[in-house]
Amino acid sequence: MEEKKRIKAEYRSSLRSKRLIREALIRMMREKPFEKITITDIVKTADINRGTFYAHFRDTSEVLSSIKELAESEISEVLNGLTPDMLLANPRLLFDSLTAMLAKDREYYRLILSVEEFRRAIMENRQRIVNDYLMKSTAVQRLSSDPSVKQSIVATFDFLVAGVMGLYADVLSEAIPAQLEDLPETLAKITGCALRQLADPLR
């Protein structure tokens, strides 16, 4: 029993250390270019020792990669259990899931989106993941042989996903006066109007 408690405590400590290191890099990137950030900068900002840093990462580039990979994996988790057909029939499912994920740690997401490099990378990655996912829907696959219809669908999805991601980013960074919890209903109405325009070719 004591061994299990020790292992659990070490695991929590490891997660905490990794998070401190990631957040320290993000904060430093708000002040100067990534290329000028050193491990010393990170350990001072995170208030940890170098040994703790090297227990988790080899260098600053690995920390940067881990932040981007984590952001990409999170959107995949949001899509878990939601099929492309379900999302097109009821996009509110995605917005509820995405909002719940962001609400659990909104300060972290607000921080990460305050760095232009991360904001751009996250937006591009998530847009690509969601777009590719929606294109796998039964209706879209059925119509993929018609280039003009497929082009219209791709353009609509691209527009919607970019707009949705941009709105979430603006709300989290407090660039616009809106509440995160209100976004699912608002976005469901907006996307519903756009998707209805595609209803005929998707039938």
Image: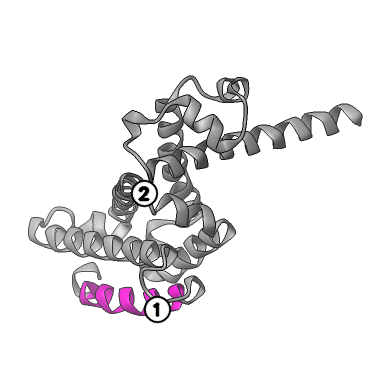
Q: Is residue 40 left or right of residue 124?
A: right
- Check disc 1: other Cα within 10 Å, few if <14, some if 14-19, many if 20+: few
Q: Is residue 110 left or right of residue 44?
A: left
Q: Quadrant of residue 166?
A: bottom left
Amino acid type at image mark 1: Thr
- Is 196 one of the magenta-colored residues? yes
User: Would you say the magenta stretch is mainly helix, strand or loop?
Assistant: helix
User: Which residue carries the number 2 mark?
Assistant: 115
**Of marks 2 and 1, the one in the foreground:** 2
Q: Which residues are magenta?
A: 183-199
Q: Is residue 11 left or right of residue 92?
A: right
Q: Quadrant of residue 183?
A: bottom left
Q: How many marks?
A: 2
- The secondary element bearing badge 2 is classed as loop
Spatial CA span between label 2 and label 1: 26 Å
- The secondary element bearing badge 1 is classed as helix
Relative to 2, residue 115 above or below: below
Amino acid type at image mark 2: Val
**Residue at the spot 55% in from the left edge and 30% down from the top edge:** 43
**Residue at the spot 78% in from the left edge and 34% down from the top edge:** 9
Q: Position of residue 45 (x, y in %)?
A: 53, 37
User: Which residue carries the number 1 mark?
Assistant: 186
Colour mode of the rendering: one colour
